[in-house]
Image (cartoon, coloured by chain):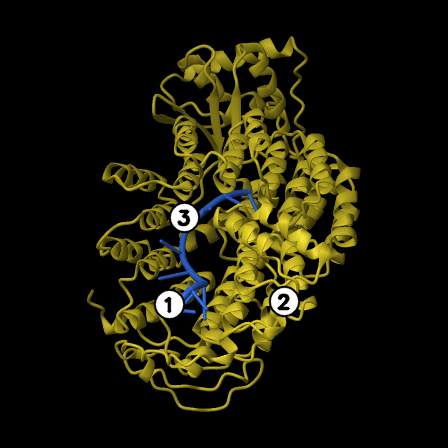
Chain colours: A yellow, B blue
Amino acid sequence: MELSLARYQCISLDQIQTSPSFPSSNHKVLRTKPLFSGYCFRFDRRKLNNPFDKIKCFSLEQGLQPRRPKPKPSRTRDPELKGTEETRVKKPSVGICSQIEKLVLCSRYREALELFEILEIKGGFDVGLSTYDALVSACIGLGTVRAVKRVFGYMINNGFRPDLYMSNRLLLMHVKCGRMIDARRLFDEMPRRNLVSWNTIIGGLVDIGDCLEAFRLFIIMWEEFSDCGSRTFATMIRASAGLELISVGRQLHSCAVKMGVNEDIFVTCALIDMYSKCGSIEDAQWVFDDMPEKTTVGWNSIIAGYALHGYSEEALSMFYEMRDSGVKMDHFTFSIIIRICSRLASIERAKQAHAGLVRSGFGFDIVANTALVDFYSKWGRIEDAQRVFDRMPCKNTISWNALIAGYGYHGRGAEAVDLFEQMLKERMRPNHVTFLAVLSACSYSRLFKCGWEIFQSMSRDHNIKPRAMHYACMIELLGQEGLLDEAFALIRGAPFKPTANMWAALLTASRVNENFELGKFAAEKLYGMEPEKLCNYVVLLNIYNRSGKLKEAAAVLQTLERKGLRMRPVCSWIEVNKESHVFRSRDKRHIQTNEIYQKVDSLILEISKHGYVPKEKTLLPDVDEQEQHVLSYHSEKLAIAFGLLNTMNGSPLQIVQSHRICNDCHNAIKLIALVTRREIVVRDASRFHRFKDGSCSCGDYW
DNA sequence: TTAGGGTTAG
């Protein structure tokens, strides 16, 4: 592989610190000299300030020579490489210990730990290194904190002093079971460390997302060993991806080439992933094309890369290429494909992926099943989502979050809250996403009291500080209750600077409550905070238009034109016979316009018999009398009418919208589904828009 | 000598 020197220039810690994912703490810019600069890896030695004062400047040049074979280790037995004698003066327990070891060999970890209970209860047994090693494997296999505490506690109580090998195993056990604080303490207290110890702790730091600390340790490690292998490179490339720093990743790539480890399969896959996560799918493709033998992980990485960049069709065609090449698919492949289907709204392909998942023996995989729960709930099949969830043999917080959010999307807030309570009863720890899901569900279903109680319990009972999105949910909830003063007070009382999302939620609340002054205030805040963001101009424009401030609206339009920002009126679309049909409110461009309008009129008449009364209140002070009529021809109703005219009786309709559905359309569509006996699914093109603007009246833009 | 690495879900 040829590398251009010009592409692999200079990284420095200040680049890391200015990356979007770097925590905005008080860390100073410490290093202006590059970590790696081209092929001349030399640094001035100088002392650095806190918090990295332990890092001394170092020279990488010796570490970048082609790898020399390591000298053979001495055959002399190192006293530290053997378990201490203290472990050998106890009661013999050969039977139990060998049974534990055999169970672990068969991956029957739970049973092994059940047997270990006998040793725990009776105590005083002679437990050998191999048994401790097996118990560590059992803990890693199960991944439970309780098992780690039991095994580690037993070792300490029995005076076991681990050698370097066992110290590394214990370190790994803590890392893999999510006990990073203990792992770090163990690592810091290790009398001797080798490359395995460093790789283990650095890998753990990357796993928990502390990539900067991983880099800090990597630098110290390099100073200590002047060497590292492909394992370290794979991990550090992953850390660059975590920090979204392509320049760092490129330099590591350069180093890997120089050290001859770039063709290592782990390094290659990490590079593909790093390039795609850092925004360069072209580089990812380049590394992938260069792979001498394309493995399952390689394919997974490149497909996930395309999906990440929004190239869902390309990702699917790569998936078909993978399938045709005969490479085995794994549970990662299916998880990625299900997510792509979710984006493409392709129920047929998702069903095929679901069937493939089961056929390939990954039917119980937690990640793929969670992706399925998310898919089915987003696409209007909450019962299917519930079924998949119920059949999952093991669930984690993410699985629960997917289902709770699903009930939320469906306006079934009470069930979402019930699920949340059930989750707590089952001792599953909620995280900030759980609260976002349940608070959004409360917001959609207008469960004010419930939402407020859950919001307050976040920090009180679960030690989770509410973030801006949680505040935005609460502002929306307060707004729905007409409590605008309280909503504004919540923004002012937030322990951080109000974010655009929070102001956007207040804006929506103001519009719903017809408080134009507060709405304008919130919109101008938004405008001031993100002057380059199109949607804020659009929100402000919509506000001005609706309040009849035509001069101000014209000024916003001029600004947009000057900046070259283009906006589109809100719209809905439906796919019929593999062709998308896009509708705007009062749209009359479609070839079937007359039929569509007649269909809408007949539908409105039909659902009126079932109690439908157009009741969306307009916020316009200067609304014309035709507004009620306009409501009938909102884009989603036109799309549904078109769908009913052009699809078979009984087949489901799927409508996608650029915006959030209004109450009137929501009520009308529910009744249309009832009278036509059709399943109708309406989905926001991006659910992240939901706090931006609660309206879908004609004349709005997005 | 053993042990440490890459891709997935909300």
The one nearer the camera, A205 or A248, is: A205
Quadrant of the rendering where the N terminus of chain A is positioned: bottom left
Image coordinates of residue A225 in percent, x first then y, are: 41, 81
Label 1: which secondary element:
helix
Q: List the residue tagged with mark 3.
A: A308
Is label 3 on the same chain as label 1? Answer: yes
Of A411 and A227, nearer the camera is A227
Q: Earlier in the sequence, mark 2 or mark 3?
A: 2
SS label for mark 2: helix
Q: Residue at x 53, y 53 (%)?
A: A101
Residue located beneath label 2 in the image: A182
Can you tell which of label 3 and label 1 is closer to the viewer? 1
**Residue A505: x and y, percent?**
65, 45
Vertical side of A641 occupied by A190: above or below: below
- Of all residues, the one furthest to the front in this rendering is A92
Q: Mark 1 — on which chain does it sit?
A: A
Q: Is residue B8 above or below residue A47?
A: above
Instruction: Give me the disc on residue A233.
Output: 1
Is circle 2 on the same chain as circle 3? yes
Left/right of residue A216 with respect to residue A443 in the rendered view? left
Q: Quadrant of residue A670?
A: top right
Q: Estimate the spatial distance between the alpha carbons at disc 2 and disc 1, rounded to whole Å.
A: 25 Å
Instruction: Give the amino acid type for the residue marked by disc 3 in the picture.
Output: Leu
Looking at the image, which is closer to me, A203 or A451?
A203
Graded by Cα atoms within 10 Å as few (under 14), some (14 to 19) or many (20 or more), the crowding at tag 2 reads few
In this rendering, is residue A478 above or below A143? above
Image-based side of A227 in relation to A599, left or right: left
- Give the amino acid at mark 2: Asp
Residue A609, percent from left and from top: 65, 8
Q: Nearer the viewer, residue A123 or B3?
A: A123
